[in-house]
Image (tube, grey):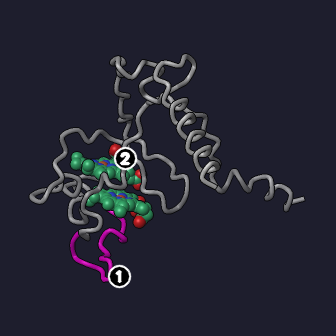
Amino acid sequence: MKRILLALLAAGLCFAAAAQNPSSPGLNHGLRGNTALDKESTPALLPKPVNDDQRKARNYPMQPPLIPHQIDNYQVDAKFNKCMSCHGRDKVADSQAPMVSVTHFMDRDGNMRNEISPRRYFCTQCHVMQTDAKVPVKNTFQDFYSATADEKKGAKK
Ligand code: HEC
Ligand code: HEC
């Protein structure tokens, strides 16, 4: 029994050592590329936020919509919420921004409040900007409509 355990332990150690090989060419270590662990890699440039004011389609109904404008230096803290100065119910007539959804006024017990619920106060917990970053891994996600398109075509026959 002991011997088996020792063998397993040794195998585990070998595996860990192989996985951490710092400069194995061809092995991609995410943002570091294949730079050796004791060297500094040149970080890639930060991708630019898409700031075209065009609201993006949602991939599924409950997706928090992407932010289609820049949000640099927008203050969101205990004192002030810059987002609500445009997206608040009483502000949208002036700003022409879409009002935060009705779910954002609901507290955790399901009561509708007059103000934004604390659960929805920190907008960027859920809403993010789109950037022009290149996808590092090919994405084959299909939304529900495209995934069922063939089925629907079949049904029409
Ligand atoms: C100066 C006014 C203003 C401020 C401040 C502002 N927004 Fe907006 N927002 C808009 C307008 C106007 C739109 C409609 C699209 C456009 O014109 O960019 C919009 C669109 C959006 C949308 C897309 C909604 C949809 O249905 O697609 C999201 C999400 C959003 N904003 C989130 C935020 C967040 C989060 C903040 C704070 C970090 C914020 N906004 C601050 C004006 C503002
Ligand atoms: C806990 C996650 C979460 C937080 C925090 C949050 N949102 Fe949302 N938001 C969502 C989701 C999910 C949706 C889409 C479903 C819905 O309407 O609830 C949404 C929808 C919206 C919409 C579109 C409304 C519509 O009717 O088309 C706007 C605008 C928006 N949020 C703005 C904001 C702003 C501004 C804040 C900060 C004050 C904020 N959200 C905070 C998750 C969040």
Q: Secondary structure at mark 2?
A: loop
Main SS of the magenta part reads loop
Q: Position of residue 63 (x, y in %)?
A: 47, 57
Regarding ligand 2, which quadrant of the image does it lie in? bottom left
Residue, disc 2: 128
Q: Position of residue 24 (x, y in %)?
A: 53, 19
Look at the numbered discs 2 and 1 and tell me whether their residues touch, using CB distance below 8 Å. Answer: no
Please tell me which residue lies in front, 38 or 140: 38
Q: Position of residue 33 (x, y in %)?
A: 46, 22
Please tell me which residue lies in front, 59 or 141: 141
**What's the magenta region?**
97-116
Residue type beneath disc 1:
Gly
Residue type beneath disc 2:
Val
Which of the 4 image quarters holds residue 54? top left
The residue at 39%/23% (across/down) is: 37
Please tell me which residue lies in front, 11 or 65: 11
- Few, some or many residues within 10 Å of mark 2 (<14, 14–19, 20+): some
The residue at 37%/41% (across/down) is: 53
Please tell me which residue lies in front, 117 or 44: 44
Label 1 within 8 A of ligand 2 by Cβ: no
**Can you see residue 18?**
yes
Residue, disc 1: 110
Say which quadrant the C terminus sits in: bottom right
Q: Earlier in the sequence, mark 2 or mark 1?
A: 1
The residue at 62%/43% (across/down) is: 7
Q: Secondary structure at mark 1?
A: loop
Which of the 4 image quarters holds residue 105? bottom left
Q: Is residue 94 rendered to the left or right of residue 28?
A: left
Q: Is residue 91 rendered to the left or right of residue 29?
A: left
